[in-house]
Image: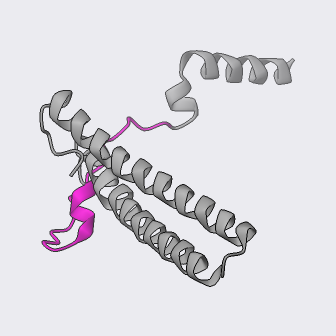
Amino acid sequence: MKKLAVLLTQIVSILFFPSITFAEESPKPTPTIPPPDLPNSPATKFTSAANLPAAIINTFVYPFLIILVFLTVFYIIRAGIQFVRSSGDPKVVADARSRLIFALVGLTIIILSYAITQLIDKLILGGTTVFK
């Protein structure tokens, strides 16, 4: 009988007084730590959610496009060298021609992707310079 009374007391205290039973504290606001003032840090571009897409695009996409342009120019030069070294062999000339065509198509796609992002920025976004 004594065990039943203790059990009922515990159940009632858990149901009706959970903050006392589990020793909960009232939630305190977590202090916000201001970011350090780093005037020339590249991390200052990522400080707010409003400029996050622009910062990501400007930080990663356009350097990637520049690297792709350099790779495309390398493939064009490689195709030219292959043309010169073909010595009239039709198979090697056809291979060099296809390589040159693919490189030129790739360069066209890279230039058009940049132009389309500029067009979207000017016409739809109103020149917000999201796409620098």
Residue 115 as seen in the image, left or right of residue 23: left
Regarding residue 33, the answer to whether it shows in the image is no
Which image quadrant is residue 126 in? top left
Compared to residue 45, the image places residue 7 above or below, namely above
Residue 4 x/y as whole percent? 83, 18
Residue 36 in the magenta stretch? The answer is yes
Compared to residue 53, the image places residue 76 above or below, namely below
Q: Residue at x 67, y 76 (%)?
A: 88
Compared to residue 49, the image places residue 12 above or below, namely above
Where, quadrant-wise, is the N terminus in this rendering? top right
Q: Residue at x 57, y 35 (%)?
A: 22
Check the image and name the residue furthest to the right: 1
Q: Nearer the viewer, residue 78 or 113?
A: 78
Residue 121 as seen in the image, left or right of residue 15: left
Compared to residue 102, the image places residue 123 above or below, namely above
Q: Residue at x 23, y 58 (%)?
A: 45
Q: Nearer the viewer, residue 29 or 128?
A: 128
Residue 80 x/y as whole percent? 52, 75
Which image quadrant is residue 99 in? bottom right
Regarding residue 38, the answer to whether it shows in the image is yes
Residue 111 as seen in the image, left or right of residue 91: left
Q: Nearer the viewer, residue 95 or 89?
A: 89
Residue 21 as seen in the image, left or right of residue 35: right
Q: Residue at x 72, y 68 (%)?
A: 90
Residue 84 x/y as whole percent? 56, 81
The residue range painted magenta reads: 24-46
Color scheme of the displayed model: one colour
Check the image and name the residue furthest to the front: 88
Residue 88 in the magenta stretch? The answer is no
Residue 36 x/y as whole percent? 20, 68
Magenta stretch, main secondary structure, is loop
